[in-house]
Amino acid sequence: MPVDFESYRPTDLPDEGTNGRRILEFLADRPDLGYRAGELAAELDIPRGSVGTTLSRLEERGLVRHKGEYWAIDPTAFDAHAASSVGLRTVAEEFAGDYYDENPDWDADLPDLNSEGGDDGERDA
């Protein structure tokens, strides 16, 4: 899949729904714990052979670390970009089905406060 070369960063998170993303999100939710590859495979229902390869790729990108056979999120490399992406996913899951989720045009009738004459046409200086 082609990427925008200027904005692409090799340390960006794996794509949504991929094994790498699922493993990374699982480990990010448990930053103080380490898991064996087999445990991750069982927890996430990912083929055992895919987990080892995926963990190695995540380690190359600086997103996970390991001690012996245990793998964990790398807190020094899990930067604001990665944290905010996982945070946004968490917020989306938390508020799925609320009024704003069910009504995507909720803001259609709000006044444009940036246009002249938006509310009373005057702005504080």
Image: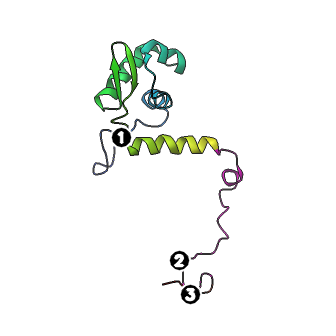
Gap in angstroms between the C-alphas marked 2 and 1: 34 Å
Q: Residues within 10 Å of mark 3 (few under 14, many from 20)?
A: few
The label shown at residue 114 is 2
User: What's under tag 2, amino acid-wise?
Assistant: Asn
The label shown at residue 68 is none
Gap in angstroms between the C-alphas marked 2 and 3: 11 Å
Which of the two labelled residues, at mark 2 and mark 3, occupies the earlier sequence position? 2
Which of the two labelled residues, at mark 2 and mark 1, occupies the earlier sequence position? 1
Q: Pick out the residue farthest to the front.
A: 32
Gap in angstroms between the C-alphas marked 3 and 1: 44 Å
* Quadrant of the snapshot with the N terminus: top left
Q: Is residue 8 above or below residue 123?
A: above
Residue annotated with mark 1: 12
Residue at image point 32% right, 49% down:
4
Q: Nearer the viewer, mark 2 or mark 3?
A: 3
SS class of the residue under badge 3? loop
Q: Residues within 10 Å of mark 1 (few under 14, many from 20)?
A: some
- The quarter of the picture where residue 71 lies is top left
User: What's under tag 3, amino acid-wise?
Assistant: Glu
Q: Position of residue 47 (x, y in %)?
A: 47, 15
Q: Position of residue 99 (x, y in %)?
A: 71, 53
Residue annotated with mark 3: 122
Looking at the rendering, the stretch of residues picked out in magenta corresponds to: 95-119
SS class of the residue under badge 1? loop
Q: Residues within 10 Å of mark 2 (few under 14, many from 20)?
A: few
User: What's under tag 1, amino acid-wise?
Assistant: Asp
Q: Nearer the viewer, mark 3 or mark 1?
A: 3
